[in-house]
Image: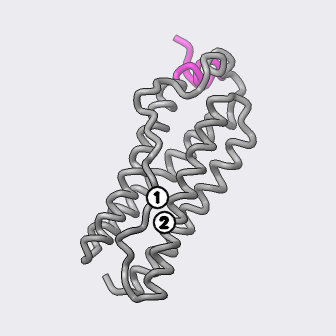
Amino acid sequence: MTANILLTSLRQAMLSERDGVSFYSMAAGQAEDRGAIDLFERLADEERRHFSALQKEYQSILDTGSWDPNTAWGSPWSPQDAGALFSADFARRIQGRHMEMAALSIGLLLEKQSFEFYTQQAKAADDANVKAFFQELASWEDGHYQMLLKQDEALKDEYWIENRFAPLL
């Protein structure tokens, strides 16, 4: 991967992460459920950290012509054991919660797209540090995807029934 291709990839990744920050911040601002607000705020924060790491690498290549293997960005938030992130009250009052459910669906699409992009960049990377960086980002985005999917699946059936999207049996 040439420096120009890498810079282009980093710019594209920064744009994607910036979109994620904007989207999750907007979702947190519009959500009513405390669990949903916390979830979207945490995701926005992680996307900010990704953006910052990408920006540091981009600047390193511009300034020195090389990748900085020491870029730090902390540990991912990992709520896999946390169970439901949305409150039980949210699940009971799910009728009309279109914004939160739409945010889950859109978040799933964003995370899947990011995972696929970072996986592709890792495969294309010649440098071991660049490859590891993109693999780590792909892993984080897959974690976000799996977490959102778990929440979506936990709420979807009740949401469909309450909003009469599912056929009545």
Q: Residue at x 58, y 24 (%)?
A: 160
Residue 43 in the magenta stretch? The answer is: no
The residue indicated by pointer 1 is: 73
**How would you rate the neighbour count of disc 2 (Cα within 10 Å): few for under 14, some for 14-19, many for 20 or more?**
some
Q: Which residue is more in the foreground, 8 or 161?
A: 8
Residue 147 horizontal/vertical position (percent): 45, 37
On residue 5, which mark appears? none
Residue 167 in the magenta stretch? The answer is: yes
User: From the viewer's perspective, is residue 134 above or below residue 164?
Assistant: below
Q: Residue at x 46, y 58 (%)?
A: 73
Residue 164 relative to residue 147: left or right: right
Residue 4 in which image quadrant: bottom left
Q: Residue at x 29, y 68 (%)?
A: 131
Residue 122 horizontal/vertical position (percent): 31, 66
The kind of secondary structure element at disc 1 is loop
User: From the viewer's perspective, is residue 145 above or below residue 22?
Assistant: above
Do the residues under discs 1 and 2 have CB atoms within 8 angstroms? yes
The kind of secondary structure element at disc 2 is helix
The residue indicated by pointer 2 is: 53
Q: Amino acid at mark 2?
A: Ala
Residue 17 relative to residue 138: left or right: right
Boundaries of the magenta span: 156-169
